[in-house]
Image: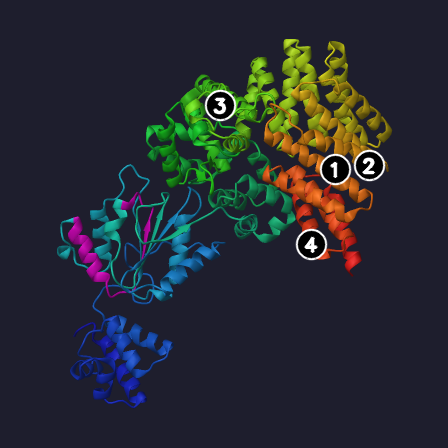
Amino acid sequence: MDPAAPVTEEFGRLLLALRKRAGLSQERLSHAAGVSVRALADLERGRARGPQRRTVQALAAGLGLDDDTAAELERAACLGRPRPRACTGPQAHSPLALPRDISDFVARGPALAGLLALAEGADPARSAVSVVSGQPGLGKTAFAVHAAYRLSPHFPDGQLALNLHGMDPEPITPRDALGSLLRAVGVAERAIPASTDDRSGLLRSVVRDRRLLLVLDNAAGEDQVRPLLPGAGHCLTIVTSRHTLAGLESVHRTALALLRREEAIKLLSHIIGPQRVQQEAKAAHNLVELCGYLPLAVRIAGQRLAGRPHERISKLAAQLAQEGRRLDTLQVGDLQVRAAFALSYRQLAPAARTVLRRASLAAGSDFSPESAALLADLPLDQVARCAEELTDAGLLQPDGAAERYRFHDLLKLFATEQVTTEDGPAVSQAAVDRTARWMLRRATAAALRFDADRHQDTPHDDPDPTGAPATRDQARAWLESERAQWLAALHRARATGRHQQVIDAAKAMHWFSDLNQHWELWVEVFQSGVDAARALGSRQDEAVQLNFLAWSYNNCVHDPHAAIATADAALTVAREIGDRLQTGWALGYGASAMHRVGRTEESITRLRESAASLADENSQQGRLAELSALNTLGNHLRLTGNAQEALTIHQRSEAISLADMAGVPAELITLYLAVARQHIGNDLAALGRWREAELPLQQALAIFEAANTAAWAEAVRLELGIVLRRLARYDEARQTLLAAHDALRELNSPRQAEATAELRELEVRTQ
């Protein structure tokens, strides 16, 4: 007896019953479905094997079946097809059956939804393929398996999983992989062709009419995967790889990311129980943060705790807080974060390994190919290619907008270990020193583009003039993106006794620092300059650097008491050496800080003295210093109720700014003009001349925005919002004040409180 008879008869009985229920003869159904009358008769009598899916779909359409009944008819047909596979789920007896799904799977909702949409909207002309990629430890295999179980109802012809061993020294060949797949879909051993191409063609032919889901796990590269992909039909293939497999054409891509904090906490709760997590909520948050929200690391930490039910979460978190022990701690049984990273590291070419481990020596949270090339002592173009290779391998995370890269925290620890092991301290220190010297020279040359006396459009003493920033905008972009690197270089120069380089760099940064007043690092820069000047015994440099430091205390970290003490120290040195310019600056910086702590009369006295000290200074620096003193003096006078005198002083400042100041860069004098007009607008506002106040404030805001000086622009925006409120232009005022409030908060400006108060006043006025 034919073992398929019972199942084919089941399909026949069901088809006959459905036809009669629809009131159709075989002839009418034949016409509606496009199936011959003889074929229908054979099917209903159980003489034909289970029909292919297309035939079943045609019959269902001809019978007008709903989705559930059509699915029932398809299951009955599937059971009758002569293929050794289960038709309603994973193949229980197949060597390529899906691995066990994990019960504590969390997150990945959008990624799963993307695969579901792919399965439901597949084009029958081309089977769908999704590549799941990402760095080691993200749970790519777990995701693919979980997705396969979730999608199994859409693939009644079965689900198969094949490990391609992409991280092994010898990954499985496409020929061997095809042999495994062909055997799993029912092809007899003797019928499997010898060549890879023939096997690939046979696989595409066999699965063409099936709804089959394939998981190709741990792929080594595109060449390994391409021959395994189905062609036309309704199959779905999920490929996992640590590489992006960017060369695969027309595929859906699922790039897994780190877990969000709440997702990591949920995973930990699933593993050790929610009560335990709730009892030590803060420690649990610290724990998942120290795991870098990497699923593998969180799972290992959870498994460790699960195996020690009486151990506190805080104890494990404290162990992980020790960077030198973190990777040792993140292992349990055969699960190891270090081992996961090492697999990928060993796959790299020697140059890429060098770039990866040396890049861990870079300062800051990210780095450029330029920094990596200096640290690796390799050509820049080669390092750029290596960085792309490391990105494709999931070992570096690229910046979305710039050519910069970052490590995951745990990967950086791993790379640092490799530096210690493979390079040793002598090579590492030489790499850091080489990079620091280069970075400090480039930073000094770039910053000099903004110097009032030495303004230039060509690089000065740059270590690589052909690759130096070509414009001021490029110089600014470089200084901003590489600030962690050149600040570290400055500290290294100071620590290694290169004091003149420190002074030169700090002095070069002075004018550039005005463009980024919100950077707190200026205190570090100018304190380094003070220390270097004292180490060299240069009193003139000491006065200059102390003035810069006083400015940064007052304007960057908003510490007026430290600013007063530092300005007084600068004043003492400047007077001892008879430097009228530095005396004027010290008086002005001290006055600004005094005003902030309520010593208003003293601040005005100092500013008048500063202006008098600078009046006879005919240098460019002297004229600019005088402008600063006048602008600040007028501001303080206005705030003490002398708005008319303030207006007169600020109009004088505006006139000086509009006069020809030979040798002063136009961009710089334009900023001084904007400051004068900002003050004029505020003076007019203080005098109640609100309509007149609007224009100079608008002019000042436009200049500051064009110069990309956020700290100055947002202060003017606040002041303009106040004027608009007093002019009863409430909608404009609200929009302006809200923008200023949000920006001032981001800049950590104390004036954000003023913006909040103005918004409240506006709400009262408009209720």
The answer to which of marks 3 and 4 sits earlier in the sequence is 3
Work out how far the residue at label 3 is from the one at label 4, CA to CA, in angstroms: 44 Å
For this view, does 752 lie left or right of residue 357? right
Which of marks 4 and 1 precedes in the sequence?
1
Q: Residues within 10 Å of mark 4 (few under 14, many from 20)?
A: few
Distance from disc 4 to disc 2, alpha carbons, whole Å, reads: 26 Å
- Image quarter where the N terminus lies is bottom left
When the figure is inspected, residue 701 is found, relative to residue 104, above or below; the finding is above
Residue 732's label in the rendered image is 4
Q: Earlier in the sequence, mark 2 or mark 3?
A: 3
Up-down relation of residue 576 to residue 133 (above or below)? above
The picture places residue 691, in percent across and down from the top left corner, at 76, 49
Magenta segment: 196-222
**Nearer-N-terminus badge (3/1):** 3
Which of the pair 97/730 is nearer the observer? Answer: 730
Q: Which residue is mark 2?
A: 638
> Which image quadrant is residue 585 in?
top right
In the rendered structure, are the residues bearing label 3 and label 4 in contact, judged by CB atoms less than 8 Å apart? no
First of labels 4, 2 by sequence position:
2
